[in-house]
Amino acid sequence: MKTSSIHGMWSSRLAFVLAATGSAVGLGNIWRFPYITSENGGGAFVLVYLICIALVGLPVMFSEIVIGRRGRMSPVNSMRELADDVGASRAWMGLGFLGILAGFLILSFYSVVAGWTLHYGFLYLKELFGGAGITDPNATFGALLANAGELTFWHGVFMVMTVGVVALGVEKGLERAVGILMPVLFVLLLILLLYGVSTGHFMDAVAFMFKPDWSQVSGGMIVTAMGQAFFTLSLGMCAIMTYGAYLPSHVHVPKVGTAVALSDTAVALIAGLAIFPVIIAFGIDPGSGGAGLIFTSLPLAFAEMPFGIAYGMAFFLLLSVAAWTSAISLMEPAVAYLVESTNLSRKSAALTVAVLGWLAGLASVFSFNIWSEVSVGGKSVMDAIEFLAADIMLPIGGLLTAIFAGWVLSKTITREELDDKMHDWAFKGWLWLTRIVTPLLILVVMAGILGVF
């Protein structure tokens, strides 16, 4: 059993929790989770979601950490090492390749969307120092999407930010970055939450998000909750597996995994409680979710509210930080694999992945302008890439991870990595979930995504 990774190690349990939470907390948390909560029964959805976290999210997260920490290498080589250890086929290395490819594809379009947040943050920064404000948000957003050069520039800026962290390594890069960025994210959330309270519509927001509507509980709502539980924790793309490879042997996996899941959920809920009071106060339709609200509706509120310019800049800074910490984890698995499998240094490997990711991201950039008429399976180019990576590859990766950890790895290995002092009932419970319940529920999620029911 290896006790350290060639790439470096997290210095503490807190460092891992911050890094894994940063991986899990992304653009979708800040808006999508509060939105789908409100649209799917409020408090009823939150309860179902937490159950799904326990039944789907945590078993797969524990499995990824176990595999990563036992192998102490990139996902591909950890899978090879562990398959050899238990006498299984090396075809399991394909799970590592699948996760790396899914993460790379997500990084390519995620960087483009993150570039939007940088652009808007810059607009509010200029306005703060006397520049022209956003008077027509729809026109501003439309002009950004139509300008391939502008999108490419901000896509490049974000990719440079990401590679700059990853190239420095685990201790000097990843750990130092999340040690700064995650506290910044929490402080920004707190500031925005306090402002939300000051609007006088905080309790309206609480009711909007959490008033239980049990009539909304249905098969479709449960599938939505399961999908959110799975995707929000960055599972299936081997990011958590890679981070697990840097986790010290003495750290209790169930404790840190649960801490990450709870932190991720808390950020999403607090974000909703910070944003929705502003939305309600200024008469914006809370149901206008996604980019339409963030980039067109909210700027209207920022223009009218006291300290709106500063709030707008803080809001888009929050989005940028959330995207940054997620992108770091998307790039790391591919970089770790290149370092292990080639003669490239970490800096060269990181630069290689960044350049390739930036080039791949141009497909998403052009899907809004030059290739706006191009359709792939009835979807735009960017939507097609997102569907392949997030809706197809990630569930398959999570399913295979659960099967490998539950059925292929020996009980001795999983027991040692989870905690050899773990109660028998707790270990058997995790094993039962990982072997039976979690795979079945992931198959249900995939069936729902593919429109089987």
Image (cartoon, rainbow, N blue to C red):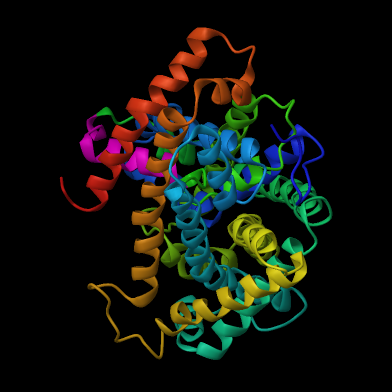
Quarter of the image where one finds residue 340: bottom right
Asked whether residue 274 is in view, the answer is no
Q: Is residue 389 above or below residue 202?
A: below
Q: Please identify the dominant SS of the magenta region.
A: helix
Which residue is drawn at the image coordinates 15% and 45% (left, top)?
Answer: 453
Is 249 covered by the magenta stretch? no
Q: Which residues are magenta?
A: 215-231
Which residue is drawn at the image coordinates 34% and 69% (left, top)?
Answer: 384
Give left or right: position of 398 versus 183.
Answer: left
Tell me the quarter of the image containing the N terminus: top right
Give how far across and how far down residue 361 sits, in percent: 51, 76
Front-most of 351 and 234?
351
Which residue is drawn at the image coordinates 47% and 30% (left, top)?
Answer: 59
Give how far across and how far down residue 7 sits, in percent: 75, 52
Asked whether residue 341 is in view, the answer is yes
Q: Is residue 206 above or below residue 231?
A: above
Is 226 covered by the magenta stretch? yes
Give how far across and how far down residue 113 sits, in percent: 52, 69
